[in-house]
Each structure stands twice: as C-alpha cells, then as structure tokens.
Amino acid sequence: MTACAIEPAAGDEDDRTARPGCTITADGAYAARLAPAGDCWFPERWTLDGPEPYAVPLPGHQPEEPGTEVQPMGDGRVLIRRLADGRHSFSLLYPTGPGTGELPLGAVECPDEGTRLRLLPPAPGGSRAYALAVGRLSSAVWLVAGGAFGPEHLAEVPGRCSGGVWLDRTGRMLALDREAGGRTKTVVVDLERGGEVSPLLQIAADSDDRLLLADPDSGLLLIRSDAPSPGQDRVGWGVLGSTLPVRFPECLRPAHCRVTPFAIQPGQVLTPENCAVALRVDGPLGSWVGVWRPAERQMRHLPAPQGWLTGAGLWTGDGVLQLPYATAEVPCGVARVTVPDVAAAQPAAEPREPEGPGELDDDPDEPDPPAPVAPRPVPLQQAPLARLVTN
C-alpha cells in the first residue's frame, strides 16, 4: 500500500503533458489558478457562467509556493493543496468580504520521499475532489474534499499510475494510465465497487497506450499511443463501445510539434465523429490552439489569445470554444471562437469493418470516419471491461 496516512484536520506532476494555466470545473461554471503578484503567488477564482467573467482573489496570510495546487469546486469554493515536510494539507478557500475564509479538511502524509501526490481533474458534479498518490509499487486514490471525515483512502491500484480521466457524469468511473511490466495501459477504477480495477485500453501487447480525454455524452476518446509507430507517440481517437479500430489521423501529428487535446464539445450524443476537439499545440515557436473533428481530415490552427492560460478552455454545446486569458489590461477574460462544422453538411460514408481485433487505422489518406455508434460497455480493442458501466 502507498505510504500515506490520514491526519485529522487542525507531488510532483508526473504526466507527460504540461499543466494547464488554470483548472475549470466539469460544468464550466468556475475556474481557479495560482495568479502571480510580483514574485509571489496567490489563489484566484474565476466565475465563468455569468454575463461576463470576473475574478476573485483569495490570498492567504502568506504567499503560496509555486507547486501549490488549486481546484474550483461546484459551489464556488476553491480547494487548495499545500505541501510541507511530506505532508499534503487540504483546505477550502472562499471570499469573506475583504478577506479569505479557509476551512481545513485534513491532510495526507507521505513519509516516503518517492511518493508523489497531485489532484486529479475536477470530478463531475463539483461536490467532491480526488487526489492520486503514486508510490514505488502502487498508486492510491484519495477522496480529499466532499467526504464526511476528512481525506479518505478509496482505492489501491498496483503499479505506478498517471493521467486521470472521468468516463461518466456521476464521478464513479475513473480511468488511469498504469505502468506495469514495462508498459503503460489504461485501466478503470470503479469508485463505487471498492476501487475495483478493470482494463480499458490495450491496442497492442507491446505498445504504451494512454487515455487523454473522454466525453461521456458521445463516448469519444482521445488516446496517445506508440502502437502505429513504435517508439513515437501519436494521438488517435476511438469510441467507447465501438468495434471499429482506433484511428491515428495524420493531421494530428504536425511536424516538430506535440499535440495535446484539452476539451471536447459536449452534448453530441451518438455522433462522436462530429464532436469538436480543442488541442494544445506546442512547437518551436510557442503554443497555440488546434481545432479538429473526427469527421474532418485536417486540423485548423488558431492563434491563441494574448495571455492565454495555456492548455485551458471549454466548449459550449453549440460549438463555441472559450479560452480564458489574463493580461495587464484584461486581468480576467475569455476569448470565444466559433468554429463551423464543415463535415456536418457532407453525407456520411459507409463504415468499414475492422480486419481484426488489433487493427490500427494509419492510412495517410484519412479514410472516412465510422457512422455514429452508441456507447456500450464493451472494449475499444482487446481489453475486456468486465462489469464496467459508464452510462
């Protein structure tokens, strides 16, 4: 078991992509970040669901360390994780007139220097928050906000885990990328069945397969794997419940750039191929925004707004991409970009059946995408989902 113990109330990020400039709740109502103030840092909450975005500073009694994590909750409070002497303490911050109120939640102690703890992405519903503690031999999932008696150990997963993607809208199914036996595969942790672990993604036996993003409405999954090009990670897509192969479009690997999806258009039930996907593109000249749909055969490259909180953003159901930014002139802003769906007016092609359970689609001519497929609790490729239920 990971060497962490609960303490009563009184990590180091290891993922392969950079942290976004802010964290946004699953419903897009609030965001939170560590804002700079000279050489210091303080928490800041953004309200995004009103007529205009606005920020509320939440400074504490002293500046925060750069490695401190903050996460917005569904009720507008901000969860903060502070690390001191191997002890991760959690509190909820909220505005109190001119000051900042703070509700201590307790702490998780990690005496093993090799253990890293970080917050998982905001859970659906916004009433709970989770953390992942990665030890030498196993990884632990903790409920750190929303429980009855402070931090609660929920699950122990053999192997070293990274990532963290929610597969449903109830906060029950959590996908983690587990490293074991020299390979990384995505597994699902069922938080309502005592942390039961089931395999989710296995494209090839000797490939490293990671889940980057998932949309519960359409079942669209964004994946990073070296299966089509051993030794080289590529971004691909599949549909939870589809028997068609995972596809790796050529347009998602621009030369000398790294592409990371960060938002999927919601509400596209049964039409995953029409979901707009926003991607962070990191290249020699900086970072910018890419927009792509599985039904299209090209990625559109868009300039990021000045002061973009890099890697952060969300879609509205009607296809408007919202990108938060902060500048000296506009300390709290959201750029809104409407991206027309070019492929929506084109007739759908007949779906092509896979030749085998491990087939990959790596055709540079970009074959037509599959017809809409209803998400079902069956594997993407060869991995059984056992009793996984995602709807």
Image (tube, helix red, strand yellow):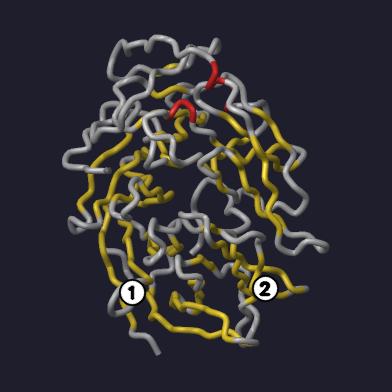
Q: Residue at x 50, y 39 (%)?
A: 265
- Please name whichever residue, 3 or 18, is drawn nearer the observer in this view of the structure: 18
Q: Secondary structure at mark 2?
A: strand
Extreme residue toward the right, this view? 329
Look at label 2 and name its amino acid.
Trp
Q: Residue at x 45, y 65 (%)?
A: 74
- When the figure is inspected, residue 101 is found, relative to residue 178, above or below; the finding is below
Indicate the position of residue 49 as horizontal and vertical percent values. Answer: 56, 59
The residue tagged 1 is 151
The residue tagged 2 is 41
Relative to 137, 344 lies left or right: right
Look at label 1 and name its amino acid.
Pro
Relative to 278, 73 lies left or right: left
Indicate the position of residue 362 as horizontal and vertical percent values. Answer: 48, 16
> Counting other residues with Cα less than 10 Å from the Cα at mark 2, is it few (<14), some (14-19), or many (20 or more)?
some
Q: For marks 2 and 1, give the CA distance.
A: 25 Å
